[in-house]
């Protein structure tokens, strides 16, 4: 139980295009989901908190107009990287809060912007 | 503010020998603490968590950690390393209280297990 999936697992796109990443809780409902970013050989940095039915809360330094988050249902949150640039290339990881207040993490999405 | 410091970026052990991954925390109150493991190209998996109950916490795959308030430490140990333990390990503290709040990750410790 408590499985979180992400789609796609990896994506390559051209600079200037937008990319949507999905995060799904497969066997539980999650009012709260989180989006993280991980650069090579570095730790995870929280980007934003996604709450079902309300606007996401962004961490300081994260551009909300660039990283659009939508949490339209209790099992799905999406992160859209708009007008992607090479510096947006990274590993994006989501988590969903399940029972006993435990965060369950997705397998991550590797984004490469050319 | 809460924070965690992982003292070693890399640890290398031989298969069958003990594992020690060190973590120190800083918090203005008694925190919850977690250890997560990340295998290559896989999602983070919760190894164990401390939530102010027993100070010695047992997790999955034979790992355990001891909360020591006097030393502000939460080191992760395993008596005998297995090749499958090779991965990156993160010590984590919630910003405020439980995991529904923001998680603050340590910088990670990469564990290598030599045959």
Image (cartoon, rainbow, N blue to C red):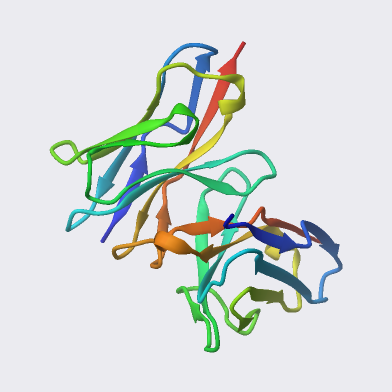
* Quadrant for the N terminus of chain B in the image: bottom left
Furthest toward the left, the residue is: B70
Where residue A87 appears, x then y in whole percent?
Answer: 69, 63
Furthest toward the bottom, the residue is: A54
Vertical order, B87 against A106 (above or below): above
Q: Taking A2 as reference, is B73 left or right?
A: left
Where residue B107 appears, x then y in whole percent?
Answer: 45, 45
Using the image as rendered, state which of residue A90 and residue A35 is in the foreground.
A35
Using the image as rendered, state which of residue A97 and residue A22 is in the foreground.
A97
Q: Residue at x 16, y 41 (%)?
A: B69
Q: Taking B74 as reference, is A27 left or right?
A: right
Answer whether residue A114 is visible to the viewer in this image: no
Vertical order, B80 against A49 (above or below): above
Using the image as rendered, state which of residue B108 and residue B19 is in the foreground.
B19
Query: In which quadrant of the rendered view does residue A95 lie?
Result: bottom right
- Total number of numbered labels? 0
Q: Residue at x 69, y 65 (%)?
A: A88
Query: In which quadrant of the rendered view does residue B115 lie?
Result: top right
Answer whether residue A85 is visible to the viewer in this image: yes
Where residue A78 appears, x then y in whole percent?
Answer: 67, 75
Where residue B113 appears, x then y in whole percent?
Answer: 57, 19
Q: Residue at x 40, y 62 (%)?
A: A101
Query: In which quadrant of the rendered view does residue A19 lie?
Result: bottom right
Vertical order, A86 against B24 (above or below): below
Q: Taking B58 as reference, is A28 left or right?
A: right
């Amino acid at each position: 139980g408590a499985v979180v999936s992400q789609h796609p697992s990896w994506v390559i796109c051209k600079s200037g295009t937008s990319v949507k990443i999905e995060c799904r809780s497969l066997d539980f409902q999650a009012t709260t989901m989180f989006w993280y970013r991980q650069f090579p050989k570095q730790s995870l940095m929280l980007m934003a908190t996604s709450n079902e039915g309300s606007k996401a809360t962004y961490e300081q330094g994260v551009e909300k107009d660039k990283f659009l988050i939508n949490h339209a249902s209790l099992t799905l949150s999406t992160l859209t990287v708009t007008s992607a640039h090479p510096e947006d290339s990274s590993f994006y990881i989501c988590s969903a809060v399940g029972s006993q207040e435990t965060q369950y993490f997705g397998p991550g999405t590797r984004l490469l912007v050319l | 503010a809460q924070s965690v410091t992982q003292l070693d970026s890399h640890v290398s052990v031989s298969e069958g020998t003990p594992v020690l991954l060190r973590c120190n925390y800083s918090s203005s109150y008694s925190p919850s603490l977690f250890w997560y493991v990340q295998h290559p190209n896989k999602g983070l998996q919760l190894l164990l968590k401390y939530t102010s109950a027993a100070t010695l916490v047992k997790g999955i795959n034979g790992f355990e950690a001891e909360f020591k308030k006097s030393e502000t430490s939460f080191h992760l140990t395993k008596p005998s390393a297995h090749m499958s333990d090779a991965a990156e390990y993160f010590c984590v503290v919630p910003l405020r209280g439980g995991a529904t709040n923001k998680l603050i990750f340590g910088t990670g410790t990469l564990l290598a297990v030599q045959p």
